[in-house]
Amino acid sequence: MNDDLPDISRLASLLADPGRSRMLLALLDGRMLPASDLARAANLSAQAASNHLARLLDGGVLRVESRGRYRYYTLADSQMAHAIEALACAAHGTSMLRPTLRPKGDPELRLARTCYRHLAGQLGTRLCEAMQAQGYLQRQDGNVFLLTRSGARWLEQALGVDSGQLAGKACLDWSERRDHLAGALGEAICHAFLTQALVSRRPGRRSLLITAQGRQFLQQQLGLAL
């Protein structure tokens, strides 16, 4: 056996339990949640949820922070989020029920949502494609997206984002089966959309509301009608 190969079976075993997978999907929007919220998302008792969370922490799938009397859980990093999103894409054709998500045909979820800390759904995929069509974004070496000079200027003028050396990554969208923009660049754009009220969060859900201001921005800046 080649000891240099990563032990994906260990990670797979942690993700295989339905309760644990439901908690991980509930964290896929990048939030930090207490154990009580995760227990409800997975339909588990407090004790069962605590046991599952301990295993996920030991396995490096989650990290936890203490805030006063409470402990808040979140995904370990963006790579873990990408892995879970990819598995959700592969499982999209099944009848698996997802925590805080309606069935796969939910129009709100498919229109706009967060995937960890970047924009996903039709909003995310069409934004990524429109930026490429405008010459703002270029795909390099498979899954890497780089801003062009005109893209960096547009990002600063239109969204107030100082792109610096930010690069993006392609993330396969589970509902659209096309790529949306992830990585540091995707996170910066998502943050700008939220802080400038182009989109707003729906309480307790991953789906986003595209505001009237956001629809106007997309139409005027990129010719997108959503």
Image (spheres, helix red, strand yellow):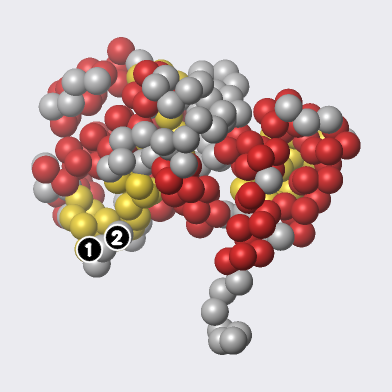
For label 1, the residue is: 140
Under circle 2, the secondary element is strand
Residue bearing mark 2:
144
Left or right of residue 84, residue 54 in this image: right
Vertical placement of 94 versus 216: above or below?
A: below
Where residue 45 sits in the image (x, y, percent)? 83, 30
Please state the horizontal and vertical placement of residue 153, each as a whole percent of the image: 20, 46
Q: Amino acid at mark 2?
A: Val
Indicate the quadrant containing the C terminus: top left, top right, bottom left or bottom right.
Answer: top left
Q: Residue furthest front?
A: 94
Q: Amino acid at mark 1?
A: Gln
Which residue is pictured at 70% across the width and 38% down the height?
19
Say which residue appears at 42% left-offset and 43% top-offset: 89
**Placement of 40 over or under 22, stated as above or below:** above
Residue 88 horizontal/vertical position (percent): 47, 42
Task: Say whether residue 156 is visible.
Answer: no
Q: Nearer the viewer, residue 41 or 129?
A: 41
Residue at screen point 77% across, 53% down: 55
- Please give the label number shown on residue 113: none
Q: Circles 2 and 1: CB distance less than 8 Å?
A: yes
Judge by depth and name the residue closer to the eye, 109 or 214: 109
Instruction: Between residue 164 and residue 77, name the one nearer to us.
Output: 77
Query: Is the N terminus in the top left, top right, bottom left or bottom right quadrant?
Result: bottom right
Residue depicted at 17% across the width and 38% down the height: 130
